[in-house]
Amino acid sequence: MNSTSVSELDIFINNSTTITTEPWFIPLGILMILCTSLVIILAIFYLFIIISDKTCHTILMMLVINSCLAALIIGCVTLSMSVFTLENDLKQIQYQDSLCIVRAYIGYASYGILNFSFFLQALYRYLIVLYPKHLFFQSIRFQGLAICLTWIYSFIYPFPFILTGDLVYNIDNQICQVRLQLSFSTIYGAFCGYTIPILLIALIYFKLVRYVKEMSKNVTVSNNLVRAKRELKMVRRTVILVGILITVSFPYTVIMCMSFFTTPPKYHFRLAYLFFNASSLSVMFSLFQFTDPLKMSIMKRIHVRTNLIASRAT
């Protein structure tokens, strides 16, 4: 055994400790791996469909691609977390590897990107309705710039977690996360990556609702009103999608609020991440249901393939 291998073995031994594994850890870990794997598969599948189908090459679908990329990153990060946790549980050890902090950091950043991707979709529809003559707002350049800014913001806002040392390895849950407690990092992270984009989406929705109501008071029905109602319907779908994300992730929110006043349950992160993975999977299914061009493209391919199989059988 060479000196490098000996050194790595010493580091592992020094950083690992034997622990007692609860019976439900293993099936929970397997379930989380299955959920995150399905999120990755769906994200890659959607990206393939959008890129390969020319009818999907629109500005709006570019924003959907942004959501799929964010979901793909979240899926890869949470899959890595789940595999690492399951491996430690199987070995009945607690051990922080060198990528633990990195996975947590990218996880926070990608979650912010996903939330802001829904905001960008709502903003695009809002600009189409209120500023139809300002073609710059509908251009690839403007929307691409908006996407880049949200990515830069999402990768910058979690950085204080590392500087303050609040991003730490949680032994009981075998994961690196910000400590859940009444602290600057907990409130700051929830506000920057979650509250801001949700509030912006809600603001756009209510402003569109008010705009449509004001237009409906006019006696003359114009194409602008029809278009405004159509885009309002699409924004409402985005609100429903975000609502699903909030609802399924609600247990994590409850646990975070509990941590402000008392010590959270011992294995709170394990349970919270199960609901988080379920919410990510729900978002992927909802994205298919609410994105008409993507849905039509997939259904068209299924229909063509079905006809091809039927013709071969005859």
Image (cartoon, grey):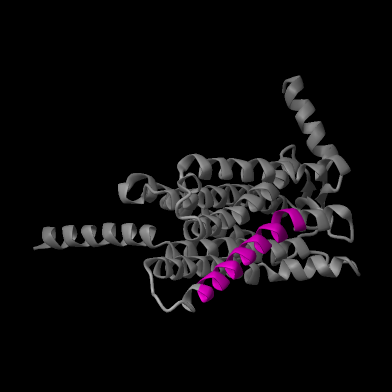
Is residue 31 visible from the viewing direction of this image?
A: no
User: Residue 189: x and y, percent?
Assistant: 77, 54
For the point 60% across and 65% down, the residue is 279
Q: Nearer the viewer, residue 60 or 176?
A: 60
At horizontal 42% and vertical 79% (from top left) the residue drawn is 219
**Residue closest to the eye, 87 or 99:** 99
- Tell me if residue 117 comes above or below residue 163 in the rendering: below
Q: What is the residue that sits farthest to the left in this orientation? A: 314
Q: Splitting the image into 4 quarters, where does residue 190 fall?
A: bottom right
Q: Any magenta on residue 301?
A: no
Q: From the viewer's perspective, is residue 215 above or below residue 287?
A: below
Q: Determine the residue located farthest toward the top in the rendered image.
A: 2
Q: Is residue 209 magenta?
A: yes
Q: Quadrant of the N terminus?
A: top right
Percent from the top left, x then y, of residue 66?
Answer: 52, 48
Q: Which quadrant would the C terminus be assigned to in this image? A: bottom left
Residue 10 visible to an observer of this rendering: yes
Left or right: residue 230 versus residue 258 is left
Specify the segment rendered in magenta. 191-214
